[in-house]
Amino acid sequence: MDDRPVGFFDSGIGGLCILEAFKKICPCESTVYIADSENCPYGNKTAEEIIALSEINAGRLIGRGCKMIVVACNTASAAAIDFLRAKYPEIPFVGIEPAIKPAAIESKSGIIGVLATEGTFNGRLYNSTKEKFARGVTILAVVADEFVDLVEKGILSGGYAEGVVRKKIEPLLAAGCDRIVLGCTHFPHLSPLIAKVIKGRAEIVEPSQAVAEQTRRVLAEHSLSSESAEPHHVFIGSMPDNLLSVPKYAISRDQV
Ligand code: DGL
């Protein structure tokens, strides 16, 4: 039994999708979440810059006593997870990458669309997974940084957001994609809008649940699980004002 918190970080509020899934399946675990909104977006930064920011975030989480860290950001996982594991060998890390493997296996049309940041598409992780598991499947990769901006501004619905989403999704559907992979943790916040645009023409694939389950597994493997009856949750960073009244986003906050 280890009651120290599990740390999460993202360039902003994207990773809250993973945090939410994790809190549901591990209700006894305390958490600390860093939204590095000040430095958002990470997607168009160099690998060196992302490594430097990830090192700061991980250092802050470890400074707060975190027992393990979930890199709740595809872009940071792509650029920095190897560095973080080497720098903090005593801390287990879980990262995230676009779920192209399940999408490729399940696709019937043999064409899948992947929405992510440039940083994720340039990473070793994405390219080796693609090489290993998506042979024979056509992958249409689309950089959708505009979605990150919408989410960080709390614009999750309405005509403007729908137009931005439609512009990225419609060409994928027209090209025959039957699976659309959300390869950035910001994008599931737009899932209702994305589903509205897709209108049943393709499946949305996103790995928040799988990452939450992997985190639970890693905790158990390292004998780090908690059975606390009073877990607490700390949010460090900023959140768009209009989301503060939405129960899903109304989590305890500790501004620094
Ligand atoms: N949420 C991050 C990801 O999963 C990236 C967003 C950004 O560009 O900062 O890749």
Image: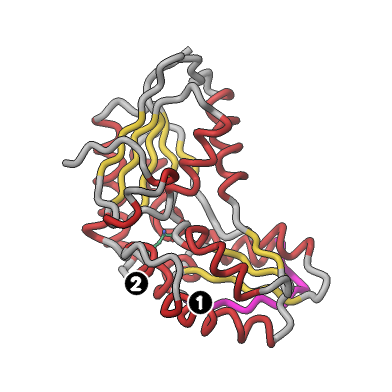
Query: In terms of depth relative to the viewer, which is nearer, 102 or 20?
Result: 20
- Where does label 2 land, which residue? 44
Residue 191, given in percent of the width and then of the height, sits at: 55, 62
Q: Residue at x 35, y 35 (%)?
A: 88
Q: Residue at x 48, y 18 (%)?
A: 226
| Residue 226 is at least partly visible in this image | yes
User: Disc 1 to disc 2, how far (Cα)?
Assistant: 19 Å
Badge 2 marks a residue whose secondary structure is: loop
Of the numbered discs in the image, which one, if any, rests on residue 165?
Answer: 1
The amino acid at mark 1 is Val
Question: Hey, which quadrant is residue 250 in on the image?
Answer: top left
- Beta carbon of the mark 2 residue lies under 8 A of ligand 1: yes
Residue 254, given in percent of the width and then of the height, sits at: 23, 36
Span of residues in magenta: 133-143
* Residue reaching furthest to the left: 256
Mark 2 nearby-residue class (10 Å; few <14, some 14–19, many ≥20): some
Position of residue 105 in the picture relative to residue 42 (left or right): right
Taking 168 as reference, is 90 above or below it? above
Mark 1 nearby-residue class (10 Å; few <14, some 14–19, many ≥20): many
Residue 162 lies in the magenta stretch: no
Badge 1 marks a residue whose secondary structure is: helix
Residue 54, given in percent of the width and then of the height, sits at: 31, 50
| Residue 11 is at least partly visible in this image | no
Taking 3 as reference, is 91 above or below it? below
For the image shown, how many numbered marks are present on the structure? 2
Residue 134 lies in the magenta stretch: yes
